[in-house]
Image (cartoon, helix red, strand yellow):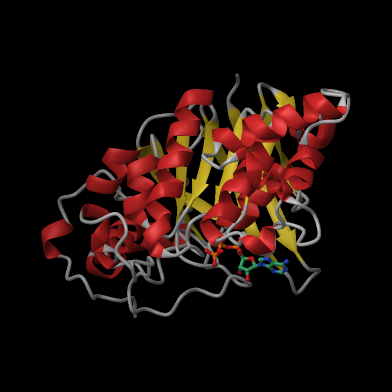
Amino acid sequence: MSDLVFDAVSVRYGGRRGLTAVDHVGLTVPSGQVVGLVGESGSGKSTLARAAAGLSPLSSGRVLLGGVDVRELPRRRPLQMVFQDPYSSLDPRMSVGESIAEAIPRGVLPSRGARRDEVARLLDLVNLDPDRAGQLPGRLSGGQRQRVALARALAGRPEVLIADEITSALDVSVQGAVLNLVRSLQRRLGLSMLFISHNLAVVRYLSDIVAVMYLGRIVEVGPAEQVLTEPQHPYTRDLLAAAPSAHTSLFDTGVDAATTDAEPADPHHPPGGCRYHTRCPIGPLVHADREVCLQADPGADSAHRRHSAACHFGEDESHLPAISRGASAP
Ligand SMILES: Nc1ncnc2c1ncn2[C@@H]1O[C@H](COP(=O)(O)OP(=O)(O)OP(=O)(O)O)[C@@H](O)[C@H]1O
């Protein structure tokens, strides 16, 4: 088992008129731990996850697993991804068993019988009756399909599971069961996990570490409890203020993280200096120091495991009582 390391990863979409969806991101998912990745829509979370899984080509940087560039791993088998929509991730013409068997690496279990037994083991692992193997996905509920998608991911015996909004398309009544299953599998199998969700309460429930993304950059990272209860970056504070359920119920509906009323920055033309300065409530109120926010990119120390924020005033809370929540940049 080894750490998953994003080393100065950038992903750019389109040509000259395109945008840099992930911009020089450094992030470590320590072996056997869960990193929750949060941030509003369009901040680059899925692109970062897809970059690790080989689904978004890197413009620069590397993704390493145990020091090995994941591009050198055969079919990236140690990294498996589960997606949001269990309706499109399974082939409707293949039985559940065939879908799972297809994901078992070739050569590992050559005999038909051994593959059938492995499918039954995997179905049991995700709490589905092995008799489901003969069914088509059309006969299954969303929650059951997501369990099959998990079984498929586990068929590759991964070290790292990348989970992108895996419960947000499910009925609220089954979200809890799927999350509990993911948590127990992660612990039982010692998996590392990059877990993306808009629901901060869910992220808090699952994660050891939380990383916060804004406009293609990691702006804060640290132990989950610290980031979610003592945030250092103004963006994280705004995110938490907009999603009070991080501190209340796990499965409230309507908890999507949104931030201040200020206009989101244009991802095609991200602001210079600190990327959050156009929306930040601190900059405009700390006039004497605002220049530094316009000029210098603070950068979070996301390669390390301590709590760190990409803010010139991150750990200095002396200005906080003066801040009014809704303040927006001029
Ligand atoms: N295939 C693509 N081609 C061009 N631009 C893209 C593509 N996929 C994503 N983008 C853009 O890249 C940026 C980051 O998108 P991404 O989906 O990674 O963000 P996200 O944080 O995962 O958002 P969400 O929470 O809505 O899934 C956005 O501005 C988005 O519009």
Q: Is residue 66 above or below residue 250?
A: above
Return the x and y of residue 304 as percentages of the image width and height.
46, 29
Q: Picture coordinates of residue 156 (x, y %)?
A: 72, 32
Which quadrant of the view contains residue 227? Answer: top left
Q: Residue furthest toward the left?
A: 321
Q: Is residue 225 left or right of residue 73?
A: left
Instruction: Tell me which residue sits at (28%, 39%) in the image.
Output: 225
If the picture is divided into quarters, which one holds ligand 1? bottom right
Q: Quadrant of the N terminus?
A: top right
Residue at the (30%, 48%) spot, across then down: 314
Taking the view exactly as shown, the residue that stands out farthest to the top is: 1
The reply to whether residue 299 is visible in this rendering is yes
Please report the residue visible at 42 percent of the width from the left and 56 percent of the height from the top: 174
Q: Nearer the viewer, residue 296 or 121?
A: 121
Q: Nearer the viewer, residue 122 or 17?
A: 122
When asked about the image quadrant of residue 74, the answer is top right
Question: In which quadrant of the rendered image does the C terminus lie?
Answer: bottom left
Q: Is residue 219 left or right of residue 323?
A: right
Residue visible at 33% across and 68% down in the picture: 253
Residue 31 seen in this snapshot: no
Horizontal and vertical percent position of residue 153 = 66, 40
Tag count = 0
Residue placed most toward the observer, 4 or 277: 4
Q: Position of residue 93 (x, y in %)?
A: 81, 60
- Quarter location, residue 86: bottom right
Q: Nearer the viewer, residue 310 or 29?
A: 29
